[in-house]
Image (spheres, rainbow, N blue to C red):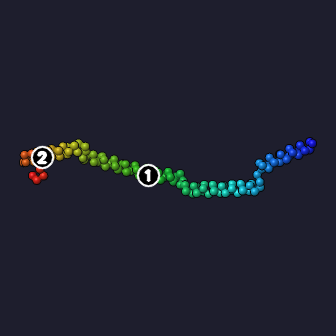
């Protein structure tokens, strides 16, 4: 009787082990799959490394951009300063005032000639 019980326990243990065990074929498949995944990852990493630009080169290029922007800004500032000294906001206001006065005189002259403002006249007059 004890031998039968031991045998049945042994059979149950073997059944549990066989359910949970990984076959040699599955291990080979997993190994192959892992190698393929590593090869793909290494290829992707190599592609990224090859497409990157070294940090020092980027810094040099960006420094060149900064210098060019600084030069352009300096030129713009110089032009603004030169233009401001020649024809400033005060001059613009004076010109606008003179234009307004000239238009008012012209309008007054036209009203004086025709007796009424141009907007009140009919198109044929």
x and y percentages locating residue 3 in the rendered image = 92, 44
Which residue is at the front of the view, 117 or 51? 117
x and y percentages locating residue 30 in the rendered image = 71, 54
x and y percentages locating residue 4 in the rendered image = 90, 44
Secondary structure beneath dot 1 equals helix
Q: Quadrant of the N terminus?
A: top right
Which residue is at the front of the view, 70 or 26? 26
Sequence-earlier tag: 1 or 2: 1
Which residue is at the front of the view, 2 or 104? 2
- Residue beneath label 1, please? 65
- Residue beneath label 2, please? 120
User: Toward which corner of the image does residue 38 lie, by quadrant?
Assistant: bottom right
Look at 60% across and 56% down and name the residue there.
Answer: 44
Look at 37% across and 48% down and name the residue there.
Answer: 73
x and y percentages locating residue 80 in the rendered image = 30, 47
> How much space separates mark 1 and mark 2, taking CA atoms?
61 Å
User: Toward which corner of the image does residue 35 lie, by quadrant?
Assistant: bottom right
In the rendered view, does 17 fall on the left or right side of 3? Answer: left
In the rendered view, does 13 fall on the left or right side of 64? Answer: right
Dot 2, crowdedness within 10 Å: few (<14), some or many (≥20)?
Answer: few
In this view, the mark in front (1 or 2): 2
Total residue callouts: 2
């Amino acid at each position: 009787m004890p031998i039968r019980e031991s045998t049945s326990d042994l059979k149950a243990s073997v059944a549990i082990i066989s359910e949970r065990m990984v076959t040699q074929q599955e291990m080979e498949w997993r190994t192959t799959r892992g190698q393929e995944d590593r090869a793909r990852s290494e290829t992707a990493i190599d592609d990224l490394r090859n497409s990157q630009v070294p940090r020092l080169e980027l810094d040099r290029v960006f420094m060149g951009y900064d210098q060019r922007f600084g030069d352009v800004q300096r030129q713009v500032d110089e032009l603004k300063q030169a233009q401001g000294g020649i024809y400033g906001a005060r001059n613009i206001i004076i010109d606008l005032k003179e234009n307004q006065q000239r238009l008012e005189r012209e309008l007054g002259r036209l009203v004086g000639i025709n007796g009424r403002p141009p907007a009140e006249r009919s198109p044929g007059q």
